[in-house]
Image (spheres, rainbow, N blue to C red):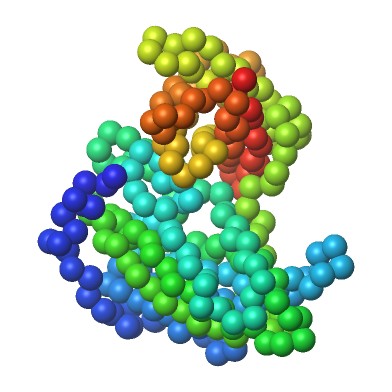
Amino acid sequence: MDEGFGRLLLFPVFAAVGLLGTALAPASAADVSPWDSDSHSAARLIAGGARQDAGARVLRAGLEIRLHPGWKTYWRYPGDSGVPPILDFSLSENVKSINVLWPAPTRFSDGAGGHSIGYQGSVIFPLQVVPQDAARPVTLRAQIDYGACEKFCVPVKAHAELAVSGAASTQDAPLAAAEARVPKPTRIGDGDVLSIRAVTREAGDKRPRILVDVAAQPGNPVALFAEGPTAKWALPVPEPVAGNAPGVQRFAFELDGVPPGETPAGATLKLTAVAGTDAVEASFRLD
């Protein structure tokens, strides 16, 4: 955890309704909810045009978080410190399901010798919304808990409400750009521009170690992230190591952070590789 989370009472959150207001482009009231702002960040819902998926109409929307310069928030797995966003849509109307997509994150120092995983500046989490009744309107109501962090972290609670019709929107372009940043599902060994070539397990000094080879286009720095089968797992952030072939970056991490009472044998890990504008994810079973 960022050390600031241990001192939250020293840093109260102040309302700042005008945060970033001069920097935000005007948009149709039907396409966005009002910003819910504090002194370091702001959150809102946006709506996009619908799409067809296997013959069903899926509504496209997004949760947008904007951060003050130098501040950050976190991915679904925050790394060595931080807290993932918690998104609650239970008060929404006429919603059968909502699938939250996570754009490729970046790795940054947590200020305490470790590394966190998340976003700086701004991020849009795309939402795939399936109505309960396609003939009735949909209203999204989001309760959002997230961390906004610089040298210290502030817990933020935001609320947003937006009617989503599926009509063409002023937010279609930024929403499509966020969707394009979502890692593409793949399999170990598949892919051309970016691929997770191989995963091996070897004995370590204290714990087994996982080695992962990632191939990417020359000149593109590569980052790799590893997640366990549940949120209770806390795997280390993979580190680049020597021993890779030309055009391949090798990463390693120990099988640390396994929940008490659980064994890694038979567990499925999710690996996410990011290089430039490309990102892929693949699953690997620990045998």
Q: Residue at x 49, y 25 (%)?
A: 263
Q: Is residue 214 left or right of residue 110?
A: right
Q: Residue furthest right?
A: 55
Q: Position of residue 79 (x, y in %)?
A: 41, 41
Question: Where on the picture, by quarter, is residue 65?
Answer: bottom left
Question: Where on the picture, by quarter, is residue 150?
Answer: bottom left
- Residue 164 visible from this viewpoint: no
Q: Which residue is nearer to you in this view: 272 or 267?
A: 267
Q: Position of residue 223 (x, y in %)?
A: 52, 36
Q: Which residue is nearer to you in this view: 256 or 248?
A: 256
Q: Is residue 138 left or right of residue 18?
A: right
Question: Where on the picture, by quarter, is residue 153?
Answer: bottom left
Q: Residue at x 25, y 38 (%)?
A: 112
Q: Position of residue 55 (x, y in %)?
A: 87, 68
Q: Residue at x 63, y 62 (%)?
A: 99
Q: Is residue 68 left or right of residue 54?
A: left
Q: Position of residue 142 (x, y in %)?
A: 48, 74
Q: Which residue is nearer to you in this view: 136 or 280?
A: 136
User: Is the residue 191 above or below the residue 139 in the image?
Assistant: above
- Residue 202 visible from this viewpoint: yes
Q: Residue at x 46, y 29 (%)?
A: 262
